[in-house]
Amino acid sequence: MQRRWVMLGAFMMMLSVAIGAFGAHALGPRIGEHNLTIYETGVKYHMIHAAGLLIIGLAAGQWGASSKLKWAARLLFAGIILFSGSLYLLSITNIRILGAITPLGGVCFMGGWLMLMLAAVGLKKDS
């Protein structure tokens, strides 16, 4: 479990940098300031939650694999796809209905962080 989530987290971090650079250098002049701000919000949340995947992978190495950690990682990954993905598409296509998907990603983000917290709370204290 640890390697899988660290690898995915590292890949998602790399992807967020590439997507951010693409937005700043190629899209900015084409989509306008308002849509670029939306796009940049997607990049910011993408990067933060990719770092969360790294944290979960490292936590699994320290604490051992658990279903709570697996769900934490799954939810953060789903949140990146739904939240950031919908913002990327919204900013590029201007299809406003895509904004209805974004809150689902936010709920996934919150659920992922909650599952990480519950995994940490469930640890037994050292004697």
Image (cartoon, helix red, strand yellow):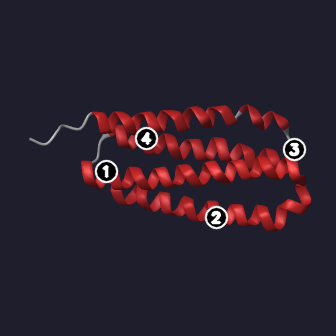
Give the spatial CA distance, label 4 vs label 3: 31 Å
From the image, tell me which residue sits under label 4: 72
Precedes in sequence: disc 1 or disc 4: 1
Q: Nearer the viewer, residue 54 or 95?
A: 54
Residue 17: give its label.
2
Name the element at disc 4: helix
Name the element at disc 3: loop
Q: Quadrant of the C terminus?
A: top left
From the image, tell me which residue sits under label 3: 94
Residue 87: give its label.
none
Give the spatial CA distance, label 4 vs label 2: 23 Å
Give the spatial CA distance, label 3 vs label 2: 23 Å
Badge 4 density bin: few <14, some 14–19, many ≥20, Cα 10 Å: many
Vertical order, 103 against 7 (above or below): above
Name the element at disc 2: helix
Badge 1 density bin: few <14, some 14–19, many ≥20, Cα 10 Å: many
Residue in the picture at 87% in, 44% down? 94
Residue 60: give its label.
1
